Every structure is written in structure tokens, then in C-alpha cells.
Image (cartoon, rainbow, N blue to C red):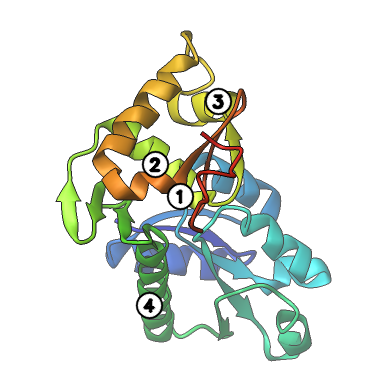
Amino acid sequence: MKNILVIVQEDALREQLVEVLTESGYNVKNTDNTKEGLELFALHTVDLILLDMAIIKTDCLACCNKFKYKPHTAIILLADYQDEMNYYRCSYDDYLIKPIDMDTCLLKCTCTLEKLMMQRNNDNVIECKGIRINKNAYTIRIDNKQLNFQRKEFALLTYLVENEGDVLTRENILNTVWGYDYIGDYRVVDTVIKNIRKKLKDKSKYIQTIFRVGYTFKIEKIDRKNDIFT
């Protein structure tokens, strides 16, 4: 079930939107002000926001940006005709002109959420040099052959590939993959890296050890003779 946040000043319109969207199968939260809207946004999963220009017209861009800090959240602006110059400056996905036609509203909500889901699916698949990681399906394929990776192996390889070219310290890796509350030896990272390399076989060359620091994932070919990495 998709989650929609309705931030509309006018009581009658807000209540109508909540009723129509709820009847259409959406999980809906609502408020008449951006302060509470930001609080709801921070506390709950929100896929789509219906945002009233009547509330934010004085600082549209800044307000929309506050709701865009979470990835993959869409915004549909509800605007009057006279708001045209303001909403062109905003960071939004679609807009509706008042008075709001509920059928049009539902159609735009459906289309915007479909685009959002396509974007999420695309962003959750990483491909690099024959390594294909699907974060949704929790699978890793090497040269189109699916291999079994343990949970920490999957998380660590994903972290490395997503940060291709960056040097990740063992501390970074422990905090990200094992969590800040992990109590144990940092050498557990080396053990998991060793297991990953065995499964990657010839592609293990892309995981380079930075002596006394950590690891990096680099896709260019390595001159083992002259390289400082081991």
C-alpha cells in the first residue's frame, strides 16, 4: 500500500482528498500546515506528497527541498492559476490546478507513483564488470550466473560497488555493514572480504586492499607488479 501525505490548508478540500485517496486504497496522513507536515514526513514512510501552494508560495523552492531530502519521494503541487510563476521555480513532479478534479487527481497520483516505482527499481540494480547486484531481490549474479552470498557478504560487496573508487576504512565498513553498536574485532571485515573474493574468482581483482586502512573497489586493470595494493 502506497503512502500519501496531504498538506492542504483548506479543510473541505483536504478532507475530500483524504476521503477519495483512502477509498482508492492509499494510506493517507494529512495536515493543514508544513510544520506538522515535516514532522509527519520525518516519522513515517511517505511515497507521495500533495502540497498546497497556498501554504508555501512565499518560499516554494526551499519548502519542496525540505521534503526532497529523502530519496524517491514525489511531490504534486496544488496551485491556483495565479501561482504559475511560483511553481515553475519549485522542485516537484507534477501539479494540479484548482479547483481540483478528483478523477484527474487520482490519475496523476497513479502515474506519479508508477514512475517513482520504476525509478526505485532501476536504482536498486547495480551492474559493473559482469557483477549484477539486485538489492530488491537480494541476489548477486556473476557473468549472469547467480551465486549464494551470506547477508554480510552481500551488504559488504554492495557497499564497495556503490562507492566504486573510494577508499573505505575498516571502521567505515564496520559501522555501515555491522552497525555502530557492533562490538568485536575489525578483522571480521578481512574474513568476509576473503570469502567474497573466493566467490568473485577472477573478478576479485577489483577489490583492492589499502594497507593498514581498508578496501576499495576499482574497475580498471591493475598492474600487480608496481601497485601499492596487496
Q: Farthest residue in the right direction?
A: 58
Label located before the other in sequence (3 or 4): 4
Residue 18 in the image: state x and y as whole percent. Answer: 43, 62
Which-is-in-front pick, marks 3 and 4?
3
- CA gap, disc 4 to disc 1? 39 Å
Sooner in the amino-acid sequence: mark 2 or mark 3: 2
The mark lying in front, picked from 4 and 1, is: 1
Mark 1 and mark 2 in contact? Answer it, CB < 8 Å: yes
Give residue 198's quadrant in the image: top left
Dividing the picture into quadrants, the one containing residue 98 is bottom right
Let me know if residue 86 appears in the view.
Answer: yes
Name the mark on residue 157.
2
Q: Which amino acid does label 1 sit on?
A: Val
Mark 2 and 4 residues: CB-CB less than 8 Å, in contact?
A: no
> Residue beneath label 3, please?
170
Which of pointers 2 and 4 indicates the residue nearer the eye? 2
Q: Residue furthest front?
A: 225
Under circle 1, the secondary element is helix
Q: Mark 4 points at which residue?
A: 106
Compared to residue 206, the image places residue 182 above or below, namely: above
Residue closer to the observer: 208 or 105: 208
- Identify the element where label 4 is drawn: helix
- On the question of residue 33 being in view, the answer is no
**Callout 2 environment at 10 Å: few (<14), some (14 to 19), or many (20+)?**
many
Instruction: State the residue at coordinates (23%, 60%).
Output: 143
Find the distance from the CA under tag 1 to the CA under tag 2: 6 Å
Q: Name the residue under label 1.
A: 161
The earlier-in-sequence mark between 4 and 1 is 4
Q: Position of residue 173 (x, y in %)?
A: 51, 30
Decide: marks 3, 4 in contact (CB < 8 A)?
no
